[in-house]
């Protein structure tokens, strides 16, 4: 897989994430579509202000969010859908 500087980055944010099949699944889809995109795991045990600044200043376009960061994802987002508002948590971030 060739990764260019123009590649759109997507990923899964959680801890642990090494067991996740999401990178393999999404990257196969991107390859089939000939999309200049890559899906990578972000194994992050704690969130904080740095993480939000990093996400919004990089070439990341979206994240699947898993335990333990769903509450953080909801709080870090600029907007949310009704279900996320009811739950107070988010499992997807579009950036």
Image: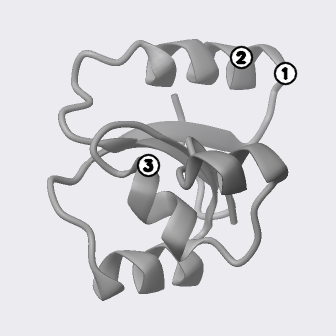
Q: Residues within 10 Å of mark 3 (few under 14, many from 20)?
A: many
Quarter of the C terminus within the rendering? bottom right
Q: Are marks 1 and 3 in contact (CB under 8 Å)?
A: no
Q: CA distance from mark 1 to mark 3?
A: 29 Å
Q: Quadrant location of residue 21?
A: top left
**Residue sitting at x 69%, y 56%:** 85
Q: Which residue is mark 3?
A: 70
Q: Are marks 2 and 3 in contact (CB under 8 Å)?
A: no
**Residue sitting at x 62%, y 13%:** 28
Of residue 23 and residue 63, the one placed in the foreground of this image is: 63
Q: Which residue is mark 1?
A: 33
Q: Are marks 1 and 2 in contact (CB under 8 Å)?
A: yes
Q: Residue furthest front?
A: 86
**Residue sitting at x 35%, y 18%:** 20
Q: Which residue is mark 2?
A: 29
Question: Of helix, strand and loop, which one carries label 2?
Answer: helix
Q: Answer above or below: position of 28 versus 80.
A: above
Of residue 92 and residue 74, the one placed in the foreground of this image is: 74
Kindly tell me whether residue 28 is visible in this rendering: yes
Q: Residues within 10 Å of mark 1 (few under 14, many from 20)?
A: few
């Amino acid at each position: 897989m060739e990764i260019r500087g123009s590649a759109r980055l997507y990923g899964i944010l959680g801890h642990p994430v090494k067991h996740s099949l999401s990178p393999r699944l999404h990257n196969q889809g991107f390859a089939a579509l000939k999309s200049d995109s890559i899906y990578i795991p972000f194994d992050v045990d704690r969130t904080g202000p740095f993480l939000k600044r990093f996400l919004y200043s990089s070439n990341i376009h979206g994240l699947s969010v898993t335990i333990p960061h769903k509450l953080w994802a909801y709080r870090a987002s600029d907007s949310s859908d009704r279900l996320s508002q009811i739950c107070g948590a988010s499992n997807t971030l579009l950036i």
